[in-house]
Amino acid sequence: MPEVSNIIVWIILGGVSGWIASMIAGKDAKMGILANIIVGIIGAFIGGWVAGLLGLGPATGLNIWSFIVSIAGALILLWIIGIVSKR
């Protein structure tokens, strides 16, 4: 079971990366803090998966690389959501 501190780090990293990604994507006004956290956390998984496929190494811990990977993954997620919601 993950430690409480790890969960708090996931929430903070997810919230900040989701917020930055939503600003880059121009969706910040449409998203609340909970949506930013969810997009950021799911984006971290997506970004880590894509980084692994590209051989760029895993995102581990609270560092700049993990932050970049999380933002990139959140942008991918927002792009996919945008495509699906247009249909």
Image (cartoon, rainbow, N blue to C red):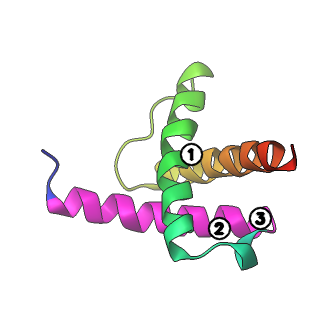
Residue extending furthest toward the right:
86
Circle 3 — which element? helix
For label 2, the crowd category at 10 Å Cα-Cα, with few meaning under 14, some 14 to 19 and many 20 or more, is some
* 6 w.r.t. 2: above or below: below
Asked if labels 1 and 2 touch by Cβ distance under 8 angstroms, the answer is no
Q: Which residue is disc 3 drawn over?
A: 24
Mark linked to residue 1: none
Identify the residue at image location x=53%, y=29%: 49
For label 1, the crowd category at 10 Å Cα-Cα, with few meaning under 14, some 14 to 19 and many 20 or more, is many
Name the mark nearer the viewer: 3 or 1.
3
Asked if labels 1 and 3 touch by Cβ distance under 8 angstroms, the answer is no
Q: Position of residue 59 (x, y in %)?
A: 44, 40
Q: Pick the quarter of the image with the C terminus.
A: top right
**Where on the picture, by quarter, is residue 11?**
bottom left
> Relative to 84, is 13 on the left or the right?
left
Asked if labels 2 and 3 touch by Cβ distance under 8 angstroms, the answer is yes
- The reply to whether the magenta stretch includes residue 17 is yes
Separation (CA) of disc 3 from disc 2: 6 Å
- The reply to whether the magenta stretch includes residue 36 is no
Q: Pick the quarter of the image with the N terminus.
A: top left
Identify the residue at image location x=50%, y=47%: 42
Give the extent of the magenta segment: 4-26
Q: Which residue is disc 2 drawn over?
A: 20
- Check disc 3 and give the amino acid type: Ile
Work out whether residue 54 or residue 28 is closer to the camera in this orientation and state it. Answer: 28
Q: Earlier in the sequence, mark 2 or mark 1?
A: 2
Q: Earlier in the sequence, mark 3 or mark 1?
A: 3
Circle 2 — which element? helix
For label 3, the crowd category at 10 Å Cα-Cα, with few meaning under 14, some 14 to 19 and many 20 or more, is few
